[in-house]
Amino acid sequence: MSMMTWKLCGPMRLGDWKSSAVLLTAALLLSSSPSARAFDMNAGVSKESGPFDLFKFGFNAYKKGQKEEAVEAYRYAAEKGHTGSRWALANMYAAGDGVVENDFEAFKIYAEIANQGVEPGSEDTGFFVNALLSLARYYRQGIPDSPVKADLAQARQIYFQVASTFGVPEAQFQLARMILAGEGGGVNVQQAKKWLNMARKSGHAGAMSIFGNVLFEEGQTVRGLAFLTAALDRCNPKDCPWMQDLQERAFSLATEDDRRVAVALAPQVYQQGD
């Protein structure tokens, strides 16, 4: 079976680090440390176990709140090439969950997952795609006190790869926002609308909100306000404030008749595919 690979565009800005060596140094140190926590022998799992058994042990340990054991298991599984364990470990570093927060360490692991590629139809595809999204976010923002500087062109290219190759709504949404803002390239409203429309058809509330705002600003008052209203009814708590600001601004500029029609139309535009 052929391997579908994805390569980072441009320099990775990671100095002369070696992907596998950097990821596994902690695991090697842990194995020789007298203070390292041993696995629960009753579970029948040790560092010599297979990667999937280690991953399962780590996952179950995490659910029980035993995060040190989870990290240890994920590291050993990662050493054996288990992509899901690498991804879980990177997430823990990114969130400071069970380990000291270290975005640069997370970035390096995500980059390793991205650079190893993925086979078509592989069960690792989800980990691969999520690693790319994390890399795009890091390139968009940069990582303070690290070699990873903000690179908007790189972030935009990664979002494009994920949006076009895998059709991920979040990537389509973030790509559209960058295109509208001219981040990492030129402004192109029609291109942005295309990506927003694709994402909102998949139920992405943020894309629906921005799409509605663009339509409103183009003069499609009722239709734009309907999308803005429909999106607000389905927003995630963390996104509700900015989406509400957009909707309230449009409401304040619309006539009473337009508002009434838009509110009545909102349930329909959410359900319709166009």
Image (spheres, rainbow, N blue to C red):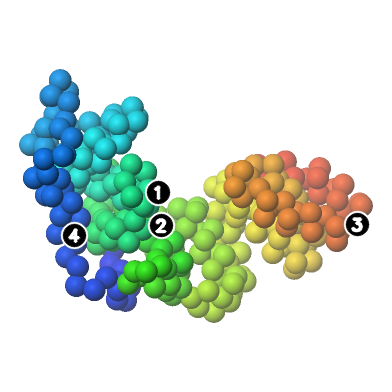
Residue 190 in the image, given as x and y percentages of width and height: 61, 70
| Residue 4 in view of the camera | no
Residue displayed at 17% across by 26% down: 40
Q: Callout 4: helix, strand or loop? A: helix
Instruction: Find the distance from the CA under tag 1 to the CA under tag 2.
Output: 15 Å
Residue furthest top in the image: 42
| Residue 171 in view of the camera | yes
Residue position for label 2 = 133
Of the two numbered discs 1 and 2 on the same chain, state the one appearing first in sequence.
1
Q: Callout 3: helix, strand or loop? A: loop
Residue 217 in the image, given as x and y percentages of width and height: 75, 67
Residue displayed at 28% across by 67% down: 7
Of the two numbered discs 2 and 3 on the same chain, state the one appearing first in sequence.
2
Residue position for label 3 = 255
Residue position for label 1 = 95
**In this rendering, the label closer to the viewer, 4 or 2:** 4
Residue 183 in the image, given as x and y percentages of width and height: 53, 74
Residue displayed at 15% across by 45% down: 30
Instruction: Find the distance from the CA under tag 3 to the CA under tag 4.
Output: 60 Å
Type of the residue with mark 2: Leu
Instruction: Find the distance from the CA under tag 2 to the CA under tag 3.
Output: 40 Å
Type of the residue with mark 4: Val
Of the two numbered discs 3 and 1 on the same chain, state the one appearing first in sequence.
1
Residue displayed at 85% across by 57% down: 252
Of the two numbered discs 3 and 4 on the same chain, state the one appearing first in sequence.
4
Left or right of residue 67: residue 216:
right
Residue position for label 4 = 22
Type of the residue with mark 1: Ala
**In this rendering, the label closer to the viewer, 1 or 2:** 1
**In this rendering, the label closer to the viewer, 2 or 3:** 2
**In this rendering, the label closer to the viewer, 3 or 4:** 4
